[in-house]
Image (cartoon, rainbow, N blue to C red):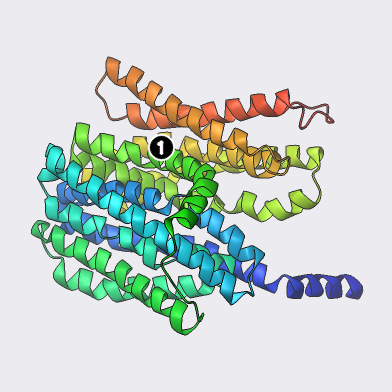
Amino acid sequence: MKKQLLEIKERIFNNKKVIENYFFMTLLLILNSLFGLLIYPYLIRTLGKESYGVYVFATSIANYFICFIGFGFELYGVRKIAENPFSNTIRSEVLSTVFTAKLYLELLSLLIFITLLKTTPILQQNPTIYWVSFSTTLVNILFPTWYFQGVQKMKVVTYIQVVFKLLSLPFIFYYVRTTNDLLIFTIIMAGSSLAGAIYAFAHLFFIEQIHLNLVPFSKVFTYIRESQYFFYANFLNIIKTQSLNLIVGARFGMSDLAIFDLAAKIVQIPMVLLTSINGALFPKVIANFNAHSLKRILRLEQLIGFLAILSVILLGKVGIWILGGETMFMAYPIAIILSCTILAFLQTGCYCSLILIPKKLDHYILKNLAISTLSLLVYMLIGLSFTNHILILPISLALSSFTEVYYLRLVIQKKHLLANESNPIRN
C-alpha cells in the first residue's frame, strides 16, 4: 500500500504542470460561466429583454470575426510552442508570425464589417453597439491564450481574466441603471476584456521576454496554409453555435433572442461541468486503446447525459425564475430541448477524442462538422417552412447533434474500430 501511494505521489509530481494546466483551464471555464450567471439577473431586469438581446446579437457577430481572425492558429500555435517550450527564440518566432497573420486578418475583417454595417438594415439600428462589440476582436490578437496553454501557464490567463472581470463589476452595477444604458454596458464589457488583453500583451514582453516582429507575408502564408484544417473545423463549429442567435434575433426579434440565450445558459451549467471529461480521458486512451473500456465509457457517458437532461427538466424552471423572472418562462421548453444536445455532445466527444483521433482518422472530424452544420440548416429550413415557431430552432439543433452521433457511429462500425468486442455500440 505504501509503495502504491509513493507511485501515485511520484506520478502527480512528474505531471505537476499538466495537472496544473488542466485545473486552470477547467477553472477558467467555470469562472467565466459563473460570471455570466452572476450579472445576468441584474442585466435582464435592468436593460430589459430587447436591449439585452441586441447585446447577444452583437457579440454573436463579433464571434464570427474572432473565429476568422483566429484562423486555427490557436491549435497550430499550441502545438508548435509545446514542441519547443524552452526556446525563447522559437516562441518569439511563432508569436511574431501569428501576430502578423492576425493583423492582416483583422484589417480584412474590418473591411468586411464596414461593408456589412452599411448594407445590412438590422445592423444600422444600433451601429455604435456593433462597433464596440467588434473592437473585442483585438483581444484575439493581444491576448494569446494559446501561448500560455502551450507553455503550461494557464494560471496566468485565469488570474488576468478573473481580476479584470471582477474589476468590471462595480462599473456595471453603478453605471448600468436603465434600458438606455446598453451602450455603457457594452463599453464596460469590451473595455475590461481589452484591458486584460493589454496586460497579457505586456506580460509577454516583461515576464516572458518575448520579442515580437512583423514577419514577411510568405511566412504568414505558410502558417495560414498549415492551419487551414483547424480553421475549417473552428469556422464550421462557430457557424453552428452562433447562427441560431443571429437567426432568432433577425427573424423573431431581440426579446426572443434574450429568452433563447437564457435557455442556452441553463443548459451551459451542466455542460461546463462535463466539457473536460473526454479531454481528461484522452491521455490514457492514447497510451492504451482498449475497445472494451471504450464501450464502458460510452455507456457511462450515456447515463451521465440522461442525468444532465433530467437535471434541466427538474431544476430548469427554478433556474429560469431566479435568473430571468416570470417573463422569461418560455426559455424552459427551449432549455429542455437544448439539453438533449448534452447527451449528443458527450457521445460525439467520445467518438472523436477517444476513438478517431487515437486512430489518426482526424479528417472524419472535419467531415462530421460539415454534416452537422449542413443538417442543421436543412432541419431549420424544413421546420420553418411549416411553422414560424422559435422551438423549430432548438429542435433542429438537437436533431443535428444526433445526426453527428449517427454519422460517427457509422464511421466507427465501417472501420471496425471496436470490432473485437461482441456487443454493438449503442447510442
Q: Quadrant of the C terminus?
A: top right
Q: Quadrant of residue 290?
A: top right
**Looking at the image, can residue 363 be seen?**
yes
- Residue 403 sits above or below residue 185 on the image: above
- Taking the view exactly as shown, the residue that stands out farthest to the bottom is 206
Report which residue position mark 1 lands on: 240
- Disc 1: CA contacts within 10 A as few (<14), some (14-19) or many (>=20): many
Q: Nearer the viewer, residue 411 or 225?
A: 225
Q: Residue at x 42, y 32 (%)?
A: 397
Secondary element at image label 1: helix
Label 1 is placed on what type of residue? Lys
Q: Is 408 above or below relative to 119?
A: above
Residue 308, horizontal then vertical, whole percent: 52, 44
- 48 on left or right of 321: left
Kindly identify the residue that appears in the image at 49 percent across and 49 percent down: 271
Give how far across and how far down residue 54 sits, in percent: 19, 48
Using the rendered image of the protein, determine whether residue 310 is visible from the camera's viewpoint.
Answer: no
Q: Nearer the viewer, residue 253 or 87?
A: 87
Q: Nearer the viewer, residue 145 or 40?
A: 145
Residue 130: x and y in percent read 19, 52
**x and y percent of residue 204 in the render?**
46, 77
| Number of marks in the rendered image | 1
Q: Nearer the viewer, residue 217 or 419?
A: 217
Q: Residue at x 25, y 69 (%)?
A: 191
